[in-house]
Amino acid sequence: MKGNWKFLFMSIIGLFMIGLSYGQTNDDQAAIDEQVTNLEQNVETSKQVMSELEQEETVEDVITAEPIGEHSKEAVEEEGHNSHGHEGMNTLDLIALLVLLAALFTFINIHYIKLPGTIGLMLQALFLSLAIVGAGFIFPSIREGAENIMRNVDFTEVLLNIMLSFLLYAGALHVDIDKLKEESASVVVLAIFGTLMSTFLIATAIYYFLGLFELGFEIEYIHCLLLGALISPTDPIAVLAILKTTNISKNLQIKIEGESLFNDGIGVVVFITILAIASGGSSHGGGEEVTAGSVAFLFGKEVFGGLLLGGVFGAFGYWLLVVIDNAHEELEVLTTLALVLVGTQIAVHLHISAPLAMVVMGLIVGRGNSTAGQLDENGVEIEGIAGEYVMKFWHLVDEAMNAILFILIGLEMLIIIEESTGAFLQIGVISIFIILAGRFLGVAIPVTILDFFKRSATGTIPILTWGGLRGGISIALALSLSNADLGGEVDGKQIKYLIVTITYCVVVFSILVQGMTIEKLVKKYL
């Protein structure tokens, strides 16, 4: 126990020094910039004096002295460069810091807090953010350093273009595709029609709700549609992570997993489509006029193109793993890794849905492991086509990236607090209940219709409503909005951070409150 506390103490001291030194670095850089500015002013003064002098000898003297000022300026800049490198942290520094935090918070959660992994990690990151804000009143450089670190992290780029494909593939790899087929009607209806219905219901309710406030800028309905599109889909990363801790029935679990995996891809496509309309087609149409036909084409291309690409890569990957036949585990790992990376890049270049492609590919490759661990007719344990080593590798990728992702979500509070206002936070808290109501209707109406054909399990509607967690994808989409898309530099920034604040409040409530109580709700209906 003493060793554990020593480890925690030294880790906290280390984080404190990182923030302090980073803030001090910025202060030192500011001092150097001030010296450079002074030298520039001196040089400018010298130039003015030179222009006023008419005698040739005096002019030559001034010209001769001029490079000295320039040399001094370059010397100060070079000194600053050699002393501090550059203003921000480089990529390796950020990765090292995030992995350190992930390891430290996981250690604390396992040994002391003992909450479900994602909840425990995010809770600690939130407390760290609040502690940094509090410490900033005494040591301003700590808060400045932490904020600068978070501003160096492009959350949208990290999640949507790097982590998302890995996380979706890893999640789909463990889903039983045969069971998913049994609930295919429910999954399709909830993922497509439920998401679209929820998007418009939430957008309409938020639009009229915001009309009650004097915000100082105009919110248009299209802006509320963007919020509805990015907040309606449940986050498969958060959902799958929480479901691991619950004892839910297999059919209902498959329904929740399938809906979250597919409505994520659908939600991103809906968001991109609405964004293209909001920006007059400049996002994906090169400034062309947006018509109903172009919107339908964009939606169909993203969805069906992603499904087709995922099917082709999934079939190819399945064939490759059958050929390898668990003979070379390292080759299997490299093969699956290459399929995810190459498949994602192809989807990006073709402008089709990479999330849907990764889900389909993961389901197809994972099908070969649905009987793994069972006994055949001769009593011999069956091996999946991917092998135990590959499944453990992707499980590790899933856990490690989840840890980093939910820490980033918690630390994003530093930027939210800086950019938001008290009114935004009040709106965000009230919006939680509006969005929950929209989720309820988006689930209840399709499930009630489906019950005419196939009776759902008891508690399906409340469990799907409360278990529809939001996570990093919603925040990443909100942060991806540009000021120009939302009405200009001034109003656009205000609208963006209003959307970001509402999204953040919903995500935090979703993961901490809904995530910690979903198991009790499940037990109530078992």
Image: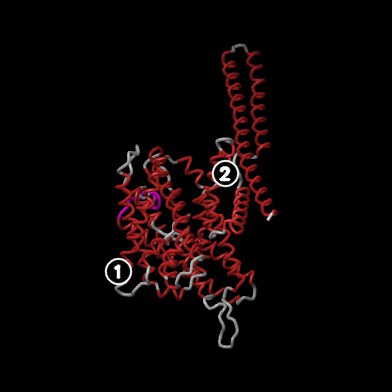
Q: Residue at x 59, y 81 (%)?
A: 381
Say which amino acid is labelled 1: Ile
The answer to whether any part of residue 275 appears in the image is no
**Image x and y of residue 213, in percent:** 32, 41
Read off the residue under disc 2: 149
Q: Nearer the viewer, residue 1 or 303?
A: 1
Q: Between residues 96 and 311, which one lies in front from this camera angle?
A: 96
299 in magenta: no
Question: The residue tagged with tag 2: helix, strand or loop?
Answer: helix
Quarter of the view holding residue 330: bottom right
Q: Which residues are magenta?
A: 282-291
In-front residue for pair 395/161: 395
Prevalent SS, magenta region: loop
Q: Nearer the viewer, mark 2 or mark 1?
A: 1
Q: Is residue 2 left or right of residue 188?
A: right
Considering only vertical position in the picture, is 159 above or below 151?
below
Badge 1 element = helix
